[in-house]
Image: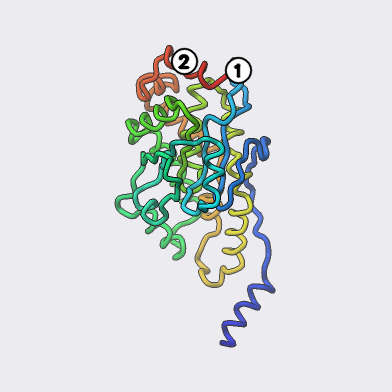
């Protein structure tokens, strides 16, 4: 018992902030939706594309998972008139933390990535054992972005089509609402002719909205490092924050594999120039 209290005292005395070099969006808290126990929740809107048209508010929503959504907050979801939710997570993630949703909302599950061999769970164990380092995390995150947009393009097509064809406000999410959700958002904005400056600013907002969560995890790992002395905290940085290079690697993979983003939109997503203009008329003003 004395040893236990000694550990608590050690933690309190040694408590210090872990400083990292994350990049944040200049958009700050633009379009944030505050609902208890739901992280990284926002809508796309108010941003201007390359043709000077502005994205309409409150039609497309994105967030982290909804497994902690309180029944008392169901009315808030109803107030923004969302009637369909697309879950981008794996079967394993959903089994561990299923969404809690109002009964009147349609639920779709479209995983473009499946962790059938339990690689994510195994990776966490390797991290704690010190067998996984910051450089490894950077490579894996970059590869994940490349694979996500190219390995199961038919699923990406389903996701994008479901969102853009929806006649009502729609929400899509993954676990943190930053990587898979970030890539889907970037592709939607590419289809609607937004330039990279705007796309990256919108993408980096996930760091703004998740700053307290990530910083808390980094501080905890730093202060309790004596429990897992081999843990490279840099891994938590690389997997907690999002980075401009991650999204750029997805764009580069599309250019490399399909020739250009326009080819990807036309041939992979099956969106003609005529259909693209219809979407632009629908979502922009």
Which is more N-terminal, label 1 or label 2?
1
* Contact (Cβ within 8 Å) of mark 2 with mark 1: no
Residue 41 in the figure: left or right of residue 191: right
**Secondary structure of the residue carrying numbered label 1:** loop
The residue located at (58%, 24%) in the rendering is 55
Measured from the top left, where is residue 187 in percent x and y? 47, 29
**Secondary structure of the residue carrying numbered label 2:** helix
Name the residue at the left extreme.
117
Name the residue at the top extreme.
274
Image quadrant in which you'd find residue 256 = top left
Residue placed most toward the observer, 36 or 102 = 102
Measured from the top left, where is residue 56 in percent x and y? 58, 24
The residue located at (43%, 47%) in the rendering is 140
Q: Quadrant of the C terminus?
A: top right
Residue placed most toward the observer, 208 or 45 = 45
Q: Is residue 149 above or below residue 70?
A: above
| Chosen colour scheme | rainbow
Image quadrant in which you'd find residue 266 = top left
Q: Which mark is residue 278?
A: 2
Q: Which mark is residue 53?
A: 1
Measured from the top left, where is residue 101 in percent x and y? 45, 47
Estimate how packed mark 2 is, as few (under 14), some (14 to 19) or many (20 or more) residues with alpha carbons within 10 Å.
few
Q: Is residue 148 above or below residue 38?
A: above
The residue located at (62%, 55%) in the rendering is 215
The CA span between labels 2 and 1 is: 14 Å
């Amino acid at each position: 018992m004395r040893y236990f209290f000694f550990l608590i005292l050690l933690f309190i005395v040694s408590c210090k902030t872990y400083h990292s070099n994350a990049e944040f969006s200049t958009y700050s808290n633009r379009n944030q939706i505050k609902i208890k126990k739901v992280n990284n929740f926002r809508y796309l809107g108010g941003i201007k594309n390359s043709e000077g048209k502005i994205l309409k508010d409150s039609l497309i929503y994105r967030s982290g998972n909804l497994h902690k959504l309180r029944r008392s907050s169901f009315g808030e979801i109803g107030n923004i008139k969302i009637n369909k939710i697309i879950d981008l997570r794996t079967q394993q993630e959903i089994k561990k933390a299923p969404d809690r949703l109002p009964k009147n909302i349609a639920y779709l599950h479209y995983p473009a990535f499946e962790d059938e061999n339990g690689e994510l769970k195994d990776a966490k164990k390797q991290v704690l054992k010190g067998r996984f380092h910051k450089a490894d995390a950077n490579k894996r995150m970059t590869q994940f972005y490349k694979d996500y947009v190219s390995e199961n393009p038919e699923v990406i097509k389903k996701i994008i089509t479901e969102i853009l064809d929806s006649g009502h406000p729609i929400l899509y999410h993954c676990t943190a609402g930053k990587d898979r959700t970030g890539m889907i958002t970037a592709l939607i904005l590419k289809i609607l002719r937004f330039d990279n400056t705007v796309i990256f600013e919108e993408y980096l907002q996930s760091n703004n909205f998740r700053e307290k969560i990530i910083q808390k995890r980094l501080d905890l790992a730093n202060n309790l490092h004596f429990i897992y002395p081999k843990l490279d905290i840099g891994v938590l940085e690389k997997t907690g924050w999002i980075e401009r290079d991650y999204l750029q690697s997805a764009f580069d993979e599309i250019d490399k594999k399909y020739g250009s983003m326009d080819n990807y939109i036309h041939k992979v997503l099956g969106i003609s120039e005529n259909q693209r203009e219809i979407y632009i008329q629908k979502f922009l003003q």
